[in-house]
């Protein structure tokens, strides 16, 4: 039987602001869409937090036996410099500044993004569609929105009519904002907008002469508005209604609100059943910002080439650190916090690596079945990774007690413990076993110790012992080489 049948998952839905039972539209199948990066600069650590959490969601759904179609897009056009939709396309601007082709910018930062994901052990999504690869579909959707009376054209640009939509539907359903309040809070910049109302948002923008990224359309040579691609690509690959839509909290408004309005206008149904949003990430207690220097790239954490952390940290430690916090809480990234996580991580890995050497006992002094149920319960409760980790540490405690002969497990329980730990540590949390590196340091230390003992044996003319040490090391594939500077070794 598939595991999902015996594990009722609960998901915090940002739309209802409550935890709800997760029941997919089609039994056994899950459609999940997560807003991907805009590839005009290096992958941002805040985004990595979001994608890492959804990677764990994806991993857990797969573990439960669901067939998951996970779509995460690449925004390679249409994302304007500011949310007021004035100004230049972010990618085109970068290309102009660096004197390169826009697609060169896109390629460079897409490669960078994938490189970061690979280093941090992400599973690739099922489909990774691009905005520029779906211009035709975006134009079709705009036509449909115009036909239904919810968009209008002005001077070659097309805008979504928020007020018209709000007459029948609720613009603000996700973010809790009210159109009336928005009107009050928006300052109109005279002569800078063709929009009927400042709340309206662009579906298509006419490109000015300087704008390099442009496509022909019935309205003008131009480019699509940023919000449109996600409605188009989620509908194309997951259908008019799908299960999970995720993203960072900062995307709730206006991006996700606009997605709902566009999709609902075309299909007449609510597009997403469960909206999930990850909270923000701060760095040393401050907002991350390039301008203040309080900034770090995901790969700089691994190399140590940065000024905000005291030393490099491994990708698995960073993953572990991320998972120690609930995805709906603000997470502060700091050297102290990472060092604490590093200690916890190595304690966990040390126990995992000792699993195969544990002796089987006659009786069990620990309720493995209950512990296993607790691990699943934590994940079933809106992917509560910090609680899962606390349960993993209960197992660490038991493993260490067995090592000291203060606890015992029967063969069957021990097997269950091993399997469950491996599932949660590696398959679900996606941590990596970096023990090989740690162990090689330990092996070197042990060989150095044996070389010292062999030297003492030779000084005492104990040739038998000295030969025994050398021969037994050779049998293990470790060669000793005596030279003027002392004895060195090599491992085959
Ligand atoms: Zn999106």
Image (cartoon, rainbow, N blue to C red):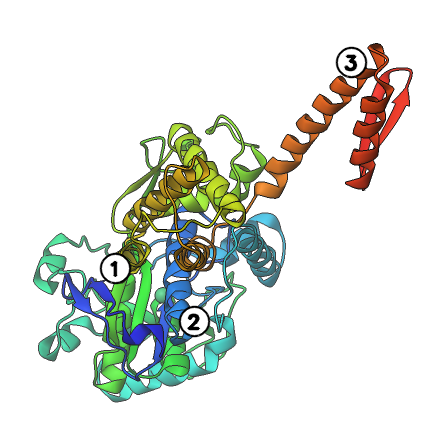
Q: Position of residue 9 (x, y in %)?
A: 25, 67
Residue drawn at point x = 36 percent, y = 30 percent: 284
Q: Work out whether residue 105 or residue 60 is closer to the camera in this orientation and state it.
A: 60
Please identify the quarter of the rendering in which residue 64 is found: bottom left
Q: Quadrant of the N terminus?
A: bottom left
Q: Is residue 88 left or right of residue 86?
A: right
Q: Which residue is mark 3?
A: 456
In the rendered image, the residue lying farthest to the front is: 362
Q: Earlier in the sequence, mark 2 or mark 1?
A: 2
Q: Is mark 2 within 8 Å of ligand 1?
A: no
Q: Quadrant of the C terminus?
A: top right
Q: Is residue 180 left or right of residue 110?
A: left
Q: Residues within 10 Å of mark 2 (few under 14, many from 20)?
A: many
Q: How many marks?
A: 3
Q: Position of residue 312 (x, y in %)?
A: 54, 33
Q: Residues within 10 Å of mark 1 (few under 14, many from 20)?
A: some
Please identify the quarter of the rendering in which residue 143 is found: bottom left
- Quarter of the displayed picture in which ligand 1 can be seen: bottom left
- Badge 1 element: helix
- Badge 2 element: strand
Q: Which residue is mark 2?
A: 71
Q: Position of residue 61 (x, y in %)?
A: 37, 68
């Amino acid at each position: 039987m598939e595991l999902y049948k015996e594990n009722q998952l609960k998901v915090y839905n940002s739309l209802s602001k409550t935890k709800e039972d997760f029941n997919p539209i089609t039994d056994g199948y899950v459609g999940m869409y997560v807003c991907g990066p805009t590839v005009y600069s290096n992958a941002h650590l805040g985004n990595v937090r979001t994608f890492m959490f959804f990677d764990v969601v994806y991993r857990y759904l797969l573990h439960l036996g669901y067939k998951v179609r996970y779509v995460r897009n690449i925004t390679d056009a249409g994302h304007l410099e500011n949310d007021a939709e004035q100004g230049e396309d972010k990618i085109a601007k970068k290309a102009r500044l660096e004197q390169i082709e826009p697609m060169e910018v896109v390629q460079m930062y897409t490669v960078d993004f994938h490189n970061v994901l690979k280093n941090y052990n992400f599973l690739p999504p099922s489909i990774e569609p691009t905005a520029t690869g779906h211009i035709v579909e975006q134009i079709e959707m705009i036509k449909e929105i115009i036909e239904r009376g919810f968009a209008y054209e002005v001077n070659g640009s097309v805008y979504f009519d928020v007020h018209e939509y709000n007459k029948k539907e609720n613009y603000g359903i996700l973010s809790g904002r009210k159109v009336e309040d928005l009107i009050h809070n928006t300052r109109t910049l005279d002569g800078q907008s063709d929009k009927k109302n400042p709340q309206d948002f662009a579906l298509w923008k006419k490109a000015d002469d300087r704008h390099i990224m442009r496509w022909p359309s019935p309205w003008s040579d131009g480019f699509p508005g940023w919000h449109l691609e996600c409605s188009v690509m989620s509908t194309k690959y997951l259908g008019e209604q799908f299960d999970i839509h995720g993203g960072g909290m900062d995307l709730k408004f206006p991006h996700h609100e606009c997605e709902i309005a566009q999709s609902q206008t075309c299909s007449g149904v609510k597009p997403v059943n469960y909206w999930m949003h990850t909270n923000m990430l701060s760095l040393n207690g401050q907002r991350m910002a390039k301008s203040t220097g309080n900034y770090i790239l995901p790969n700089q954490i691994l190399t140590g080439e940065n000024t905000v952390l005291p030393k490099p940290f491994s990708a698995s430690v960073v993953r572990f650190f991320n998972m120690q916090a609930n995805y709906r809480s603000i997470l502060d990234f700091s050297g102290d916090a990472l060092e604490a996580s590093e200690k916890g991580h190595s304690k966990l890995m040390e126990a995992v690596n000792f699993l195969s050497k544990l002796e089987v006992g006659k009786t069990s002094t620990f309720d493995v079945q209950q512990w296993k149920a607790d691990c699943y319960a934590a994940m079933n409760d809106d992917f509560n990774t910090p609680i899962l980790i606390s349960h993993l540490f209960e197992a660490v405690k038991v493993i260490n007690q067995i090592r000291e002969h203060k606890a015992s497990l029967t063969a069957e329980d021990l097997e269950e413990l091993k399997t469950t730990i491996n599932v949660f540590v590696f398959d679900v949390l996606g941590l990596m076993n970096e023990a090989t590196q740690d162990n090689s340091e330990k092996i070197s230390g042990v060989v150095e110790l044996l070389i010292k003992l062999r030297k003492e044996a030779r000084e005492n003319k104990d040739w038998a012992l000295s030969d025994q040490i050398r021969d037994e090391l050779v049998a293990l594939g470790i060669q000793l080489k005596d030279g003027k500077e002392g004895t060195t070794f090599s491992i085959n």
